[in-house]
């Protein structure tokens, strides 16, 4: 019976083997044929996209042509910027939609670590204005520590998470509408890492982590850098995914010329370009002529940093793809078959917003998670809102305490918890920042000051800070403040502060300097205040100040030593919604101060002093802006030390006069400054401008002297640059009375 059973089974097995042979033979034949055929018999096509910074935007143009020609893409493998474009395509996003989204991106914001300045806490705004140099050092365990990269990439990561959030619950990248791989580098071993699972946005961010530009990304204990270091054109990865045909797009940055290697930035970029060129050469050797398709767009002089040229990159990508359209057309599907292909790879569906059961902040070591949570808008019992979460993440980034902030929606016991994962800056909690001020009026007045700021954070569970500043140069100053929030929301605070300052003060008779004083200021005080977040703050409290003015040089003998003690109540209010500390396009900034001297507690005078400064930025188009500003002040008591006088004179403060040439107890001043953006500044800054100003004002010694008829009228023309050490101006100013001067200025005028 057994033998009979085997004999009856043999013909069936033989028939089955013949059928399998025919099936695999036909499949092999289809894979080797370049003809497109039907959707079921066509070869599997893989798209490989290389990295190259802004040059990677070219891939969008290539995708547009592939979609127009109805070329199906079954797999995508990509590196760096190519991974971002490829990852979005893998989620089902069309090329036109990608083009629309990327056209709306503010690339300046994207490649910055801070949220929009308008949304920063008032104290962070002050720091960014005083210390414009984009370098933050840490001091810990007796050592100076450095950040991991020039840019931490927080805004980029936040944006990537926002547009790929429907993929958060995808366990494997094979489950995306188009299977996808992103290439990164293990920065410890130097090995290539192929991301085939995990949060998609983290894979994209890890792949685009250019050393020295973006900080590497740490995921599950591994540190990942840019994939271009090991495999910028991952043809080999695509072969392993199962592609029969590879369409490779190579937009790698060419090597720099000898002249371009004169800076540290240029040398660093060239090192990366050399590594990239070597591994791309090996990948190109894997392409099979006559079957695979190579697209190499000619991008001319456009560089990896030209993100504002997105439209041009996309145009050049389309042009390059159309140049090889005969080779691509061989793999095009008929309209019906292409519609079937599209139907099978529908974009990921939008997900319903769950009700949040609990909000958590995780990953802190120094920071108090309860304090951080109290500042968030996301609340338990409310629906998840990506807009609210984005605002909360910006708020956490805006504290300046974190190098990375992400969020997760966690399923626990049938409910959805929202967890904010934070990574504290490893170079904290002592932070050092730097600023620079310099001016020259080309008439012998040259000032130079270097600022070093220190901040120690989280001195206690409510987030107390100790802030110090040292200034060297024309002004010698040390200031210190203990800033102490007094409840978890950090709305109310106390501030104990002190300052010692020495600076020169000059006295003029007309245009002639007749005396120079060395002025000593010693001040201490205590404030109770209200922190209004990005709107500003209010402060009120007692203040003591000792002034002493010692004559250093005088043309006359009537300049004695002067002393003054002021003890009284100080009230301050600040509002700042400018979108940039120096070249703002919109927003209003107001600083108001009031001081009342009280002889009953030791003041030499019962002085009442007011001061208000304001600046309103008005956009006049993409490249033009107008700043309308004013300064007003009154003091009802004469100060012989001149330390509390209001001063005018110098660039944009009655241009044409010498610095602080006018002083008095009553001040009225207004100006309008126009800026026209000429273009980008390259490696040393963001942009440069041509502009001019109209100015009106004067100072008077007594109220009865105030007369707008004798106010100065002045104008200036200037060249300005938004550099990485602060604003730079080269200017010429002239008054209606004939005074004129040239100026070189670094810092806020």
Image (cartoon, rainbow, N blue to C red):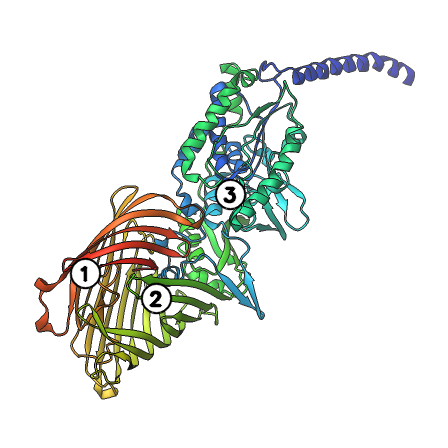
Which residue corresponds to mark 2?
A: 447
Which residue corresponds to mark 1?
A: 739
Vertical arrangement, residue 646 with respect to residue 7, above or below: below
Q: CA distance from mark 3 to mark 1?
A: 43 Å
- Front in this rendered view, residue 273 or 541: 273
Looking at marks 2 and 1 on the same chain, the residue that comes earlier in the sequence is marked by: 2
Question: Exactly how many numbered labels are in the figure?
Answer: 3
Vertical arrangement, residue 608 with respect to residue 728, above or below: below
Residue 586 is left or right of residue 23, and the answer is: left
Q: CA distance from mark 2 to mark 1?
A: 20 Å
Where, quadrant-wise, is the C terminus in this rendering? bottom left
Looking at marks 3 and 2 on the same chain, the residue that comes earlier in the sequence is marked by: 3
Vertical arrangement, residue 228 with respect to residue 644, above or below: above
Which of the 4 image quarters holds residue 660? bottom left
| Residue at left offset 63%, top offset 29% | 284
Which of the 4 image quarters holds residue 743? bottom left
Which of the 4 image quarters holds residue 17? top right
Which residue corresponds to mark 3?
A: 259
Residue 20 is left or right of residue 649, and the answer is: right
Foreground mark, 2 or 1? Answer: 1
Looking at marks 3 and 1 on the same chain, the residue that comes earlier in the sequence is marked by: 3
């Amino acid at each position: 019976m057994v033998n009979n059973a085997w004999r009856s089974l043999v013909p069936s097995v033989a028939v089955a083997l013949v059928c399998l042979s025919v099936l695999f033979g036909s499949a092999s034949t289809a894979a080797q044929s370049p003809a497109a055929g039907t959707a079921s018999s066509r070869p599997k096509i893989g798209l490989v996209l290389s990295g190259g910074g802004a040059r990677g935007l070219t891939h969008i143009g290539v995708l547009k042509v592939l979609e127009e020609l109805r070329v199906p893409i079954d797999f995508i493998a990509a590196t760096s910027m190519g991974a971002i474009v490829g990852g979005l395509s893998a989620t089902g996003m069309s090329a036109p939609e990608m083009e629309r989204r990327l056209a709306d991106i503010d690339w300046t914001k994207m490649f910055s670590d801070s949220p929009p300045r308008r949304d920063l806490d008032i104290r962070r705004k002050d720091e960014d204005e005083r210390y414009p140099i984009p370098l933050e050092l840490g001091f810990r365990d007796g050592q100076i520590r450095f950040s991991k990269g020039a840019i931490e990439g927080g805004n980029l990561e936040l944006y990537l998470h926002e547009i790929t959030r429907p993929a958060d619950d995808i366990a494997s990248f094979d489950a995306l509408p188009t299977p996808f791989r992103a290439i990164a580098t293990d920065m410890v071993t130097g090995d290539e890492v192929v991301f085939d699972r995990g949060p998609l946005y983290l894979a994209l961010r890890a792949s685009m982590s250019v050393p020295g530009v973006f900080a590497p990304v740490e995921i599950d204990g591994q540190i990942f850098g840019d994939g271009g270091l090991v495999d910028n054109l991952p043809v080999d990865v695509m072969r392993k995914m199962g592609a029969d045909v590879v369409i490779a797009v190579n937009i790698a940055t060419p090597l720099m010329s000898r002249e371009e290697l004169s800076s540290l930035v240029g040398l660093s970029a060239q090192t990366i370009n050399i590594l990239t060129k070597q591994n791309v050469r090996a990948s190109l050797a894997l392409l099979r002529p006559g079957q695979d398709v190579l697209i190499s767009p000619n991008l001319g002089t456009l560089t990896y940093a030209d993100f504002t040229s997105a439209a041009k990159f996309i145009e050049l990508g389309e042009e390059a793809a159309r140049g090889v359209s005969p080779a691509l057309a061989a793999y095009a599907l008929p309209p019906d078959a292409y519609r079937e292909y599209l139907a099978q790879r529908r974009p990921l569906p939008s997900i319903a917003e769950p009700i949040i059961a609990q909000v958590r902040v995780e990953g802190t070591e120094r920071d108090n998670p309860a304090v951080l949570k109290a500042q968030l808008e996301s609340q338990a019992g409310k629906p998840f809102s990506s807009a609210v979460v984005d605002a909360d993440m910006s708020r956490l980034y805006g504290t300046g305490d974190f190098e990375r902030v992400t969020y997760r929606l966690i399923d626990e016991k049938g409910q959805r918890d929202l967890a904010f994962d934070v990574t504290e800056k490893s170079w904290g909690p002592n932070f050092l920042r730097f600023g620079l001020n310099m001016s020259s009026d080309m008439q012998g007045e040259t000032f130079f000051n270097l600022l070093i700021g220190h901040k120690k954070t989280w001195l206690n569970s409510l987030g107390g800070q100790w802030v110090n500043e040292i200034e060297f140069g024309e002004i010698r100053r040390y200031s210190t403040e203990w800033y102490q929030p007094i409840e978890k929301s950090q709305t109310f605070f106390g501030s104990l502060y002190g300052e010692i300052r020495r600076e020169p003060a000059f006295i003029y008779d007309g245009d002639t300097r007749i005396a120079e004083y060395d002025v000593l200021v010693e001040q201490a005080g205590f404030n109770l205040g209200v922190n209004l977040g990005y709107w500003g703050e209010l402060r009120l409290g007692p203040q003591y100040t000792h002034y002493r003015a010692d004559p250093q040089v005088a043309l006359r003998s009537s300049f004695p030593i002067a002393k003054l003690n002021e003890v009284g109540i100080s009230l301050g209010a600040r509002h700042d919604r400018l979108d940039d500390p120096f070249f703002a396009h919109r927003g209003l900034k107001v600083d108001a101060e009031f001081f009342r001297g009280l002889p009953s507690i030791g003041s030499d005078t019962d002085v009442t002093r007011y001061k208000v400064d304001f600046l309103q930025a008005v956009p006049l188009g993409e490249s033009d802006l107008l700043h309308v500003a004013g300064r007003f002040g009154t003091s009802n008591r004469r100060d012989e030390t001149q330390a509390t006088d209001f001063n005018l004179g110098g660039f944009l403060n009655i241009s044409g006069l010498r610095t602080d040439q006018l002083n008095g107890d009553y001040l009225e001043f207004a100006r309008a400054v126009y800026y026209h953006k000429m273009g980008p500044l390259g490696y040393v800054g963001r942009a440069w401008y041509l502009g001019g100003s109209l100015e009106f004002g004067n100072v008077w010694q007594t109220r009865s002297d105030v007369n707008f008829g004798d106010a100065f009228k002045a104008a200036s023309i200037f060249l300005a640059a938004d550099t990485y050490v602060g604003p730079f101006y080269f200017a010429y100013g002239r008054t209606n009375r004939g005074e004129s001067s040239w100026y070189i200025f670094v810092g806020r005028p």
